Image (tube, helix red, strand yellow):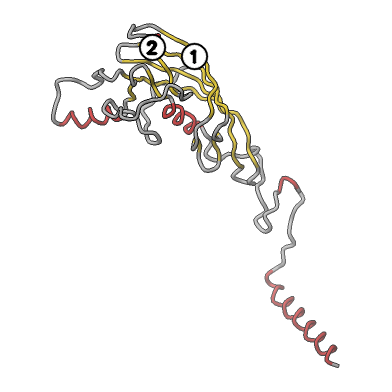
Amino acid sequence: MACPPSHRRARAEPKKAGALNTRLDHRNPLVFDTHELGRRPGAMKKVSRSVPAPKDMGIEVIGVREGAEITLDLRLESVMEGVLVTGTARAPLSGECVRCLEPVERELETDFQELYSYPDADTRTGGHHGAADAGDDAEEEDTLFLEGDLFDLEPVLRDAVVLELPLQPVCQDDCSGLCPDCGARLADDPDHHHEVTDIRWAALQEIQLSGAEDGADENQEK
């Protein structure tokens, strides 16, 4: 089931209609061509592609390593305002368990949907000025635009992957973590423990040890 179009742009800057100075490179594996669709609403194209993961696609404890293979299955559909992109991404995750710091490897699958508007499309409500302009500007900030027939999937893919990541990854649900005293991994030694000294006798033991050391020194002097 396709998820609704994403309106989250906290992690990736959208390409606005007036910000087309940096030309998209059709050789970039995350740049897609919609030329075959034309501007015929209802025209559709399916694309499957494996791409190397860009850098910084993750959070501190887990993510997709740069260069790892991401499998994309996309449906590109021409609509009145632009091209609606619906897709599924599959990628390997690498990270570490937050309890015992052991490596964590798993597969991620996430769905996404985004509308890429034509550069000359007016996605704002026309004929209104004043207070409404602020809301219109905010809406435009969240709009992704086609550059000619090309669109860049990276910001949408990055958001979809990061939002799907576990914030507290663990190697297994019942991971016992590390020993707070010595840092040993408790899963490797279920019987691991440390002798606990009653604090009421700790001072007496120190006095006894100190006395034994003094006696040994006196014997050496004789």
CA separation in Å, label 1 and label 2: 13 Å
Measured as percent of width and height from the top left, residue 49 is found at 53, 19
Apparent side of residue 23 relative to residue 195 in the rendered image (left or right): left
Q: Residues within 10 Å of mark 2 (few under 14, many from 20)?
A: few
Q: Amino acid at mark 1?
A: Val
User: Which is more toward the observer, 30 or 7?
Assistant: 30
Q: Is residue 68 above or below residue 73?
A: below
Q: Considering only order in the chain, which callout, 2 or 1, is on the residue closer to the N terminus?
A: 2
Apparent side of residue 185 relative to residue 20 in the rendered image (left or right): right
Q: Residues within 10 Å of mark 1 (few under 14, many from 20)?
A: few
User: Which is more toward the observer, 146 or 90?
Assistant: 146
The residue identified by callout 1 is 47
Q: Is residue 16 above or below residue 121?
A: below
Quadrant in the rendering for residue 6: top left
Q: How many callouts does the rendering have?
A: 2
Residue lying farthest to the bottom in this orientation: 222
The residue identified by callout 2 is 35
| Nearer mark to the viewer, of 1 and 2 | 2
Q: Amino acid at mark 2?
A: His
Badge 2 marks a residue whose secondary structure is: helix
Q: Residue at x 48, y 16 (%)?
A: 74
Q: Are marks 1 and 2 in contact (CB under 8 Å)?
A: no
Measured as percent of width and height from the top left, residue 44 is found at 42, 8
Quadrant in the rendering for residue 45: top left
Q: Residue at x 40, y 9 (%)?
A: 36
Badge 1 marks a residue whose secondary structure is: strand
Residue 141 is tagged as none
Measured as percent of width and height from the top left, residue 179 is found at 67, 53
Q: Quadrant of the C terminus?
A: bottom right
Measured as percent of width and height from the top left, residue 123 is found at 26, 20
Q: Residue at x 65, y 37 (%)?
A: 172
Apparent side of residue 35 relative to residue 186 in the rendered image (left or right): left
